[in-house]
Amino acid sequence: MARILLVDDDAAVRAALAELTRSQGHEAVLAASGAEALAALEGADVVVTDLAMPGMDGLELLRAVHERDEALPVVLLTAHGSERIAVRAMKAGAYEYVSKPFDVDEMALVLDRAAEARALRTQSRRLRAEQAIGRRIVGTSAPMRRLLDAVARVAGKDVTVLVRGETGVGKELVGSLLHAESRRATGPLVRFNCAAIPPELAEAELFGHARGAFTGAVQARPGFFAQADGGTLVLDEIGELPLGVQAALLRALQDGEIQPVGAARLEKVDVRIVACTNRELEAEVRAGRFRADLYYRLAVVELVVPPLRDRREDIPELAAELLRHYAERFGVPDVRLSPALVARLVAADWPGNVRQLENTVARLVALSSGGEIGPEALEPAPGASAAPSAAAAPTGGAEADADAEGPATREPGRPLTLREQLEAVERSIVARAMTDARGNQSEAARRLGVSRGTLIDRLKRFGLAPDYGGRR
């Protein structure tokens, strides 16, 4: 199904086009003028517009559409005798023109061909991007198509991009795509996690340092900006960057110059910045935790990655791709998800988004011996602590990574941290091995590929009695 934008100042013509479009299985979006069409352009797969309209005519709309998306097919409706103008429109990039009054069968064929051409272009662009980044891009929902279209439009323009979205939605994937589809694709792609570096080291890590700049600096070291010279620097969790370093980053963005810590001279760098955040930077600016001038420099173009709950139709394909990956990685043959389990996955809200779904699928595969996995697998294994279910799994992110509490000390209602989730999975594996070995510790250790002493240590850590099952 394609989303087709129908533009005509005649209400009767719009209604006829809409009926035809819907009868072909496509979505119809109506606009009475060129201005209305541009306001509704987001997410359109095909534009059908009348040539003669008051205000902005069809040719002007064609040019305006292609300024935003040059690959978007535009079909022109022309009155009899306007063929010369229609030829000019074709030279200007129109996909096709149809004379009014139009033949229904001819118009239906043009719509289907234009929608197919759009789909093929999108697929071709996606395959090139997947080849460049070395991973598959999953997502055919309208929100994902709009995001990928926006990425394609922005990637070739050497502007700074701010990628916003909740934890785990895949902001790093957007950064990779922007690099892969840009003129810098042959240059380096470098990532810097602003939340993973102590504030006192952030400036030296970003801009490098001279020999002797501080205790332990026995030799000069290039920073991430220098490493990304000629390419793209992705700044993850930009909202965590200390205020003092933000000023230096602003200078680098404005002037293309950096000054390594302890160095006397400036260095020129040619770097495109893609900044990612799960915070509302406008609120951080108002709270005085983020510089307003830096925010405006970073947000030349803003891209928002949709949360998984807003694109549920992508979950079955995404879960299948993750299942294939982890089945191959863990060596689990002939494993598949039951329809009932897929329905549970689709219905879940996934506060941790794709990362949470990935963790859940990895756990399902790790605990499976092959065959079909049913919805009961989302429940805790017998004798195991409460493992995360699809509806209440860990949110992931820097907050979870920093939390050191174990499952026993977790506050009621607080989501499981990454460490807690991993411990729950490990505990389930150990408990299952002991059950399968009927409590024989030596046999369970052999199955797990660890020593008997290591197994006993795990049994104690997870609150499983050393004589688990009554046998040694």
Image (spheres, rainbow, N blue to C red):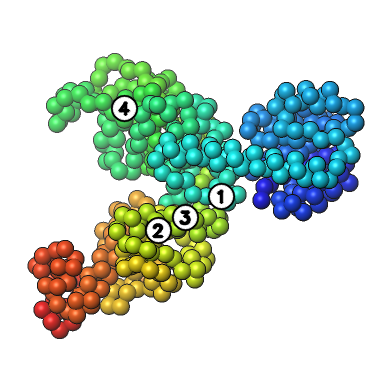
At x 79% / y 33%, what residue is drawn?
97
At x 75% / y 40%, what residue is drawn?
110
- Spatial distance from mark 4 to mark 3, Cα to Cα? 33 Å
Look at the numbered disc 3 and give the secondary structure of its residue. helix
Q: Are marks 2 and 3 in contact (CB under 8 Å)?
A: no
Look at the numbered disc 1 and give the secondary structure of its residue. loop
Q: In this view, does 367 lie above or below 246?
A: below
Q: Quadrant of residue 252?
A: top left
Residue type highlighted by circle 1:
Thr
Q: Is residue 364 above or below residue 63?
A: below
* Mark toward the viewer: 4 or 3: 3
At x 44% / y 33%, what residue is drawn?
180
- Tell me which numbered mark, 2 or 4, is placed earlier along the sequence: 4
Q: Mark 1 points at which residue?
A: 140
Report the side of 290 relative to 461 (left or right). right
Q: In this view, does 210 lie above or below 69?
A: above
Q: Determine which of the numbered discs, if any, sits on residue 318 in the image.
A: 3
Q: Mark 4 points at which residue?
A: 227
- Tell me which numbered mark, 1 or 4, is placed earlier along the sequence: 1
Crowd rating for badge 3 (residues with CA inside 10 Å; few <14, some 14–19, many 20+):
some
| Image mark count | 4
Q: Name the residue under label 2.
A: 323
Crowd rating for badge 1 (residues with CA inside 10 Å; few <14, some 14–19, many 20+):
some
Pick the front one: 383 or 337: 337
Residue type highlighted by circle 4:
Gln
Crowd rating for badge 2 (residues with CA inside 10 Å; few <14, some 14–19, many 20+):
many
- Spatial distance from mark 2 to mark 3, Cα to Cα? 9 Å
Residue type highlighted by circle 2:
Leu
At x 51% / y 63%, what residue is drawn?
346
Look at the numbered disc 4 and give the secondary structure of its residue. helix
